[in-house]
Image: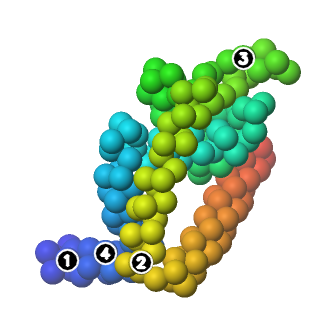
């Protein structure tokens, strides 16, 4: 393969890959939120974990539920929980319903940090919205939500096909 062909391939991927564009946008937004949350010693990725835990209510969330909510692998969620647990923001306990399962709960320190993070998050979100436009943000939010749903369905469909193929062996 010639260097020129390789450069054309790279150019095509760089300009047409939704995955690359989504990661670039994600990193750009994460920088803004990370900067806003820095006074609390919190990163935007950690904020999303805290939010996901709270969204599951006072009974807490299993690792699997968090993985689904955050669109992450379970092992990645577990890795991301450790610093939050060490910081005292989360508590991981055995489930009352199934001793084999673990449940993630927000601590009172986690509640306080989430309350302190909210105005910082609000300010960063306002800056982004003012820069991009309220309608554009609403459209982006809707389209990304739809994309995540469809990508997850495609991934599950593919996983189902590979499992059924494996079962035929």
Specify the quadrant of the image occupied by residue 169: top right
Q: Earlier in the sequence, mark 4 or mark 1?
A: 1
Precedes in sequence: disc 3 or disc 2: 3
Sequence-wise first label, 2 or 1: 1
Q: Earlier in the sequence, mark 4 or mark 2?
A: 4
Image vertical order of residue 71 relative to residue 40, above or below = below
Q: Is residue 78 left or right of residue 43?
A: right
Name the side, left or right, on which 139 lies relative to 55: left
- The residue singled out by tag 1 in the image is 7
Callouts 4 and 1 close, C-beta under 8 Å: no
Identified at 82% across, 18% down, the residue is 96
Where does the N terminus fall, quadrant-wise? bottom left
Label 4: which secondary element? helix
Q: Mark 4, mark 1: which one is toward the viewer?
A: 4
The alpha-carbon separation of the residues under discs 1 and 3 comes to: 53 Å
Q: Nearer the viewer, residue 41 or 10?
A: 41
Residue 169 visible in the shown view? no
Give the mark nearest the N terminus, 3 or 4.
4
Q: Which mark is residue 94?
A: 3
Q: Nearer the viewer, residue 80 or 156?
A: 80
Give me the disc on residue 130. Answer: 2
Cα distance, mark 4 to mark 2? 28 Å
The CA distance from mark 3 to mark 2 is 44 Å
């Amino acid at each position: 393969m010639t260097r020129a062909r390789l450069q054309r391939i790279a150019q095509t991927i760089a300009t047409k890959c939704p995955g690359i564009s989504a990661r670039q946008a994600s990193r750009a937004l994460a920088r803004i939120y990370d900067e806003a949350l820095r006074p609390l010693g919190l990163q935007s990725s950690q904020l999303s974990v805290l939010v996901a835990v709270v969204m599951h209510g006072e009974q807490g969330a299993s690792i699997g539920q968090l993985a689904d909510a955050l669109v992450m692998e379970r092992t990645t969620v577990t890795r991301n929980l450790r610093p939050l647990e060490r910081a005292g923001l989360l508590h991981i306990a055995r489930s009352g319903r199934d001793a084999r399962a673990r449940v993630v709960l927000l601590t009172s320190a986690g509640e306080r940090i989430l309350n302190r993070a909210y105005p910082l998050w609000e300010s960063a979100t306002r800056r982004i919205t003012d820069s991009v436009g309220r309608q554009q943000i609403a459209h982006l939010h809707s389209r990304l939500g739809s994309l995540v749903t469809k990508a997850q369905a495609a991934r599950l469909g593919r996983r189902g096909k590979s499992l059924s193929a494996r079962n035929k062996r």
